[in-house]
Image (spheres, coloured by chain):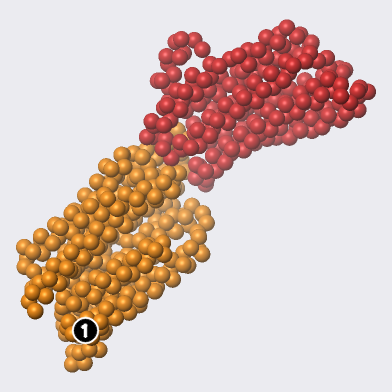
Chain colours: A orange, B red
């Protein structure tokens, strides 16, 4: 039994590394910088990857502890089969999202899976106090964070754009001035993108949360926890550099006509939102925030918004939590039915 | 192009190269328009000289090569590259149309039907000169002041509308002259008027493109 337990711990760490790789591979934050052509493409990826590593290693503690321990209440503790169910469920839903071409929230997927697994656990163990299953205050702050962060992103982008446009951009008369100004923003974008990548790494608690849960459950010691973090950092960098290049290149190619100032405003707002929520231990959906920021920017510029496309995206977002919960619960039930638990 | 001018090209900015190119093409176009004036006055010698200069001049090729090399290397203009290239191509088209017109005009030695016809040709030619100079000003204003460029383009469009009316007046006269239907003179004059309007239409389309750039890049109050 101990052998099986160790094997599953190792499997969890491997799956967490793969999840970390996919997080890096799906992070589109460096795209605006790649689109400007200010730096060579590989350098852009390295900057993005380094940001993710720094965030993962040094700033992810709060979010990791939320995922790995604080989300649950006093009557429930993670078991390795719970964690395994959560990871598998999260990965399945992300794969579905990739095929559907929708940028799904891995954060919502993770917490949906945890929710489903814990509910199934409660059903299988009627003696456990359901009132103590979840940390209610953490759950409330999480849900508020998920709804508030995109809305804040929208308004903050709109306001920031209006201010920069009114006091600076409107004063640029000729194409020469505009090009000079945008060159400045291209360079400023480097700092903004780096900052966003740091806090994306810090806020992406899916993989690091699993490692934290193993540490909190005494499946690994503190040295093992840090070793796991370093591995996840390496894999998130590799994910960005090896797989993320296609996402970044694809998005950058579509946005070569976009002004660097627009990208800078977007990145600054995303950074502010992540900077505020991450130390509070609230994992949010980075992709939701980015989409709402883009809507905010388009609103500020009085440009059209593709509501039809948004509608499809919103549907998947709303479905993510319950479907991930269902899949997570079913996988955990499968382990239970087959006598693993 | 003089040697010292050729040497200074690599030192010019993208915007300066565009302006230099515009000047070069504009001068050739003015040469063509002045050639038409010589034709109206029946000064065939100067007419031939002017039109042959337009056909044979290739000095703008050097500017074009320098511009393209500079543009593709430039990191500063990355989000305006496509538009800068298109702008340059539209200036180049003025030269292409001018060359086409010159070659066509040299096919035959025409004598205009009457003085009234000459008056109208002179008028339409004068308008062509005006919009040629104005589009050159509009292009040079893109760098320092896009709003001014927009206003100049409005004037170009207005002038071209007047040219259109003048064109119908000319064609109406032409169709009602007493000459054989397949007369070389008739064909020549018909194509002559249409070629002038082809140049005018291109300049008008160019003006609209500049206005598009203005709305694209300016953040209006």
Residue, disc 1: A338
Residue A43 percent location from the top left of the image: 27, 42
Q: Position of residue A111 (x, y in %)?
A: 28, 73
What is the x, y in percent for residue A160?
Answer: 39, 53
User: Which residue is situated farthest in the bottom direction here?
Assistant: A127
The mark total stands at: 1
Residue farthest to the top, as pictured? B45
> Residue A292 appears in which quarter of the rendering?
bottom left
Residue A341 quadrant = bottom left
Looking at the rendered structure, the secondary structure element under dot 1 is: loop
Residue A340 in the image, given as x and y percentages of width and height: 17, 82
Q: Residues within 10 Å of mark 1 (few under 14, many from 20)?
A: few
Is A274 situated left or right of B24 in this image? left
State whether residue A215 appears in this view: yes
- Residue B181, compared with residue A275, is above or below; it is above
Horizontal relation, residue A79 to residue A332: left or right? left
Identify the residue at image location x=76%, y=33%: B164
Residue A4 lies, with reference to residue A156, above or below; the image says below
Front one among B62 and A89: A89
């Amino acid at each position: 039994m101990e052998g099986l337990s160790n094997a599953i711990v190792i499997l969890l760490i491997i799956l967490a590394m793969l999840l970390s790789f996919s997080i890096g591979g799906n992070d589109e934050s460096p795209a605006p910088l790649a689109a400007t052509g200010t730096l060579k493409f590989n350098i852009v990826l390295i900057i993005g990857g380094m940001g993710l590593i720094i965030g993962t290693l040094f700033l992810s503690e709060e979010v990791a502890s939320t995922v790995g321990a604080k989300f649950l209440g006093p009557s429930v503790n993670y078991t390795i089969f719970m964690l395994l169910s959560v990871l598998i469920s999260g990965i399945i839903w992300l794969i579905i999202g990739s095929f559907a071409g929708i940028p799904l929230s891995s954060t919502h997927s993770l917490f949906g899976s945890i929710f489903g697994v814990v509910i199934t656990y409660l059903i299988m163990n009627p003696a456990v106090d359901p009132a103590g299953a979840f940390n209610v205050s953490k759950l409330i702050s999480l849900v508020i964070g998920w709804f508030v962060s995109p809305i804040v992103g929208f308004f903050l982008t709109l306001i920031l754009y209006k201010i920069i446009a009114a006091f600076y951009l409107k004063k640029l008369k000729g194409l020469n001035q505009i090009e000079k100004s945008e060159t400045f923003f291209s360079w400023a974008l480097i700092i903004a993108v780096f900052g966003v990548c740091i806090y994306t790494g810090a806020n992406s608690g899916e993989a690091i949360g699993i490692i934290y849960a193993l540490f909190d459950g005494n499946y690994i010691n503190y040295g093992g926890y840090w070793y796991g973090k370093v591995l996840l950092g390496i894999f998130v960098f590799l994910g960005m550099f090896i797989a993320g290049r296609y996402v970044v290149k694809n998005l950058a190619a579509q946005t070569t006509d976009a002004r660097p100032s627009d990208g800078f405003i977007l990145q600054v707002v995303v950074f502010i939102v992540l900077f505020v929520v991450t130390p509070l231990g609230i994992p949010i959906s980075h992709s939701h925030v980015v989409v709402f920021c883009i809507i905010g920017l388009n609103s500020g510029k009085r440009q059209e918004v593709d509501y039809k496309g948004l509608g499809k995206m919103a549907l998947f977002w709303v479905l993510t939590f319950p479907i991930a919960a269902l899949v997570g619960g079913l996988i955990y039930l499968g382990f239970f039915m087959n006598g693993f638990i | 192009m003089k040697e010292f001018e050729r040497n200074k090209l690599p030192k010019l900015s993208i915007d300066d190269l565009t302006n230099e190119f515009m000047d070069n093409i504009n001068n050739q176009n003015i040469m063509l328009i002045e050639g038409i004036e010589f034709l109206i006055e029946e000064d065939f010698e100067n007419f031939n000289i002017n039109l042959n200069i337009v056909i044979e001049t290739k000095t703008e090729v050097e500017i074009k090569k320098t511009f393209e090399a500079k543009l593709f290397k430039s990191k500063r203009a990355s989000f305006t590259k496509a538009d800068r290239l298109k702008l340059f191509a539209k200036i180049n088209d003025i030269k292409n149309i001018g060359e086409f017109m010159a070659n066509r005009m040299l096919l035959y030695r025409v004598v205009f039907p009457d003085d009234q016809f000459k008056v109208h040709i002179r008028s339409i030619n004068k308008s062509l000169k005006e919009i040629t100079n104005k589009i050159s000003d509009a292009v040079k204003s893109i760098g320092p002041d896009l709003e001014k460029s927009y206003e100049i383009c409005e004037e170009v469009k207005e002038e071209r509308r007047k040219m259109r009316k003048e064109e119908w007046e000319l064609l109406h006269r032409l169709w009602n002259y007493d000459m054989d239907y397949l007369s070389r003179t008739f064909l020549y004059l018909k194509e002559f008027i249409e070629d002038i309007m082809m140049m005018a239409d291109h300049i008008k389309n160019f003006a609209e493109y500049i206005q598009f750039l203005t709305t694209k890049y300016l953040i209006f109050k």
